[in-house]
Amino acid sequence: MKGICPFCEQERVLDHVTKPENINVRGELIEVESEFLTCLSCGNTFDDPQSEFDPLVPAYREYRKRHGLTQPEEIRQFRKRYGLTQSEFSAILGWGIATLNRYENGALQSEAHEKTLRLSMKPENFLRLIEETPSALNEEKRKRLTEELRKEEEEALSFERVIELHFGRYEPDEFSGYKKLELSKLFNTIVFFCKEPGVMKTKLNKLLFYADFRHFKEYAVSITGARYAHIPFGPAPDNYDYYF
């Protein structure tokens, strides 16, 4: 292709190239593959003024992945799951609609807003938010969501009771890394390790064990509070088949 080279200040033959670029995201350097133009006459590389590629998009996505932050599509999916508009959802969260729109379109959320998002995605918390902001929804939608969320909350509590029947409600001790069993953290840890392909059950059991014991070694408390058993293929959470 032909275009103006800013170094030659003339029309030259240009070539599209990609190369690694370090993007600073909140003090952390993240390498992404960025798009550039190279002048075949002088050999200099420069940004393509007509390119729609924004290196911040993959950099922010990688940063969220590393730190376990909510991705834009997760926010959209949660909002649409309950049939909410951006205006309704932002009103429930106590945000401006522009803030929610930026996050759904790739802007990096603040730590405070991330905590609000994570908490609001639990049925019992989202129900409380809806009840505390009656003006955010019309009466029909508020009634529908309230009934739906109460049902989800009851199902979650029923599940907790079923877990207690299988594992009991034990106090923190040396077998649990001095932490109560925290199912949400255990399940999220399982999901985290299973994001990469090829993680079979035996490997997953060992990853859970090493994660909890490494955390215990460094901070004197485990991550999940799970108790571990010795089985022929290595350590595994007690009654692990039930979790899976």
Image (cartoon, rainbow, N blue to C red):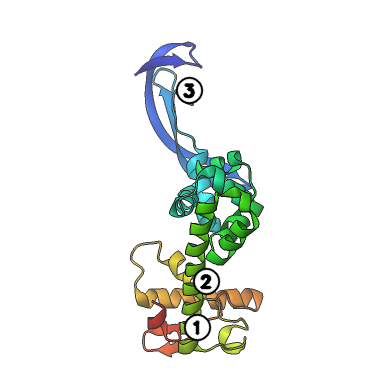
Q: Secondary structure at mark 1?
A: helix
Q: Residue at x 58, y 89 (%)?
A: 170
Quickly name the residue at label 1: 161
Quickly name the residue at label 3: 49
Q: Residues within 10 Å of mark 3 (few under 14, many from 20)?
A: few
Q: Secondary structure at mark 3?
A: loop
Q: Secondary structure at mark 2?
A: helix
- Quadrant of image for the N terminus: top left
Query: For this rendering, which residue is in front, 115 or 221?
Result: 115
Q: Position of residue 211 (x, y in %)?
A: 52, 73
Residue flagged by tag 1: what amino acid is it? Answer: Arg
Across the whole image, how many numbered discs are drawn on residues?
A: 3
Q: CA distance from mark 1 to mark 2?
A: 14 Å
Residue flagged by tag 2: what amino acid is it? Answer: Ser
Query: For this rendering, which residue is in front, 86 or 149?
Result: 149
Q: Nearer the viewer, mark 2 or mark 3?
A: 2
Quickly name the residue at label 2: 184
Q: Residues within 10 Å of mark 1 (few under 14, many from 20)?
A: some
Q: CA distance from mark 1 to mark 3?
A: 59 Å
* Mark earlier in primary sequence (1, 2): 1
Position above or below: 12 against 240: above
